[in-house]
Amino acid sequence: MSINEQLIARVEDLRIPLNDLFSPLDWKDWYHFILIDIQSGLRVLVNMTMIGRPQQGEIQVSFIVNLPSEQITQQHQPDTPLATFATTFSLEWQQDMVCRHPLRLQGKGIYLEINGKHSVIEVQDERAQLFIRFQGEAQAMPLLVTEDSPFGSGFIGWGLVPGLKVMGELSVCGQRFNIHQDWFCYHDRNFGRFRWGEDIGWEWFVVFATCNDGRKIALILDQRTNKDHSVGGLPYIFIYLGNNLSKVFLGANLSINWHWSESPVLPLRLPGTMASLFGDRKLKYPQRLQVEAADEQDQLLLSVHFDAMTELVVPDNQSRQYTFIEEVTGNAEISLSLQGETLRANGLIYGEYVV
């Protein structure tokens, strides 16, 4: 399959006006990667966000690794089936840290370069003993879903490339893992102008699974909401078979049902300063998720059991208000009737529930 490089360029294009000394400080532009190794069950999130403008902004980094305990070779394995290793940190946005063409972002502990369908990503936090570096080449059909959807006091845009061929290296507390072409890599982009802590939220996930006949399937869901999720925008779910977009369900054809724990708990919360500030904030966590979709031709049933959650607390850069991003992951089962054929698949999910 040939990749539309003009469309990829539109997806990846940095929207913050770098040379405007008076551009609004509520600009946000982020580059988001999810890596999944179906064979081992290992999952990784890497996100780099630019907020504000050069000299008056920040670059925020999130790096989360979910590692099955049996994969840990250290003497003392955790009691839980899935161990989470994570770090977040911020850098002051200096003038020379970001280049637009080709896109390049670099600073202490981070490097991102995207040139056409090729990318290089690196994050290192020596204190957390976490390191990743990988190269990617876009394989799946890119989508630029929206560029100016109303969101909070402003707007948001979203584009995605749900399939990169990758190779590289991951290190977790001194234990090394090779990233290779059998890993699934999802990449998307958000950009826009709004304020963290406004009456905003979203529900998003990517599922990667293997069908009984060996084919690979990916599901991507997105729905923008208000903070308590009582009001939602148009939901949609994209279905990829291999690298090709094969189906889209949207709107009233979709039913999304989250099932929550009975008792609230204290989650793993980042960054550490926010864990202290919100040390008493307990919350119920998602245990299961079921998504059903149907139209006149096709049907989808997705059943999910979650096994880990990490909360990211994101502060606004102009006032004392916050958005809470619940990063969740688990196991997924898919039953899909598509064009007269029934596909069954098992895999892993990585998602976000934002309040």
Image (spheres, grey):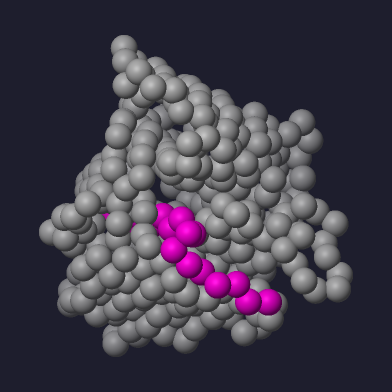
Taking the image as shown, residue 320 lies to the left or right of residue 269, namely left
Magenta-span inclusion, residue 186: yes
Q: Is residue 99 above or below residue 35?
A: below
Could you say which is closer to the camera, residue 130 or residue 168? 168
Residue 188 appears in which quarter of the rendering?
bottom left
Tell me residue 44's x, y (percent).
Answer: 55, 61
Residue 272 rendering spot, x and y as whole percentages: 67, 69
x, y (%) of residue 35? 49, 59
Q: Main secondary structure of the magenta part?
A: strand
Q: Is residue 341 visible?
A: yes
Rendered residue at 77%/31% (across/down): 262
In terms of depth relative to the viewer, which is nearer, 337 or 247? Answer: 337
Instruction: Please provide percent x and percent y for residue 224.
Output: 39, 38
Instruction: Left or right? Give the position of 280 relative to 40.
Output: right
Kindly identify the residue that appears in the image at 23 percent across and 72 percent down. Answer: 115
Asked if 343 appears above or below 318 in the picture, the reply is above
Q: At 39% from the left edge and 22% from the top edge, which residue is drawn?
A: 341
Is 313 drawn above or below residue 144 in the view shown? below
Q: Nearer the viewer, residue 331 or 197?
A: 331
Q: Residue at x 62, y 84 (%)?
A: 126
Total marks in image: 0
> Can residue 203 be seen by looking at this rendering?
no
In this view, the residue farthest toward the left is 6
Is residue 308 found inside the magenta-colored segment of the image? no
Identify the magenta region. Answer: 175-193
Question: Which residue of the protein is positioned furthest toward the front in this rendering?
Answer: 213
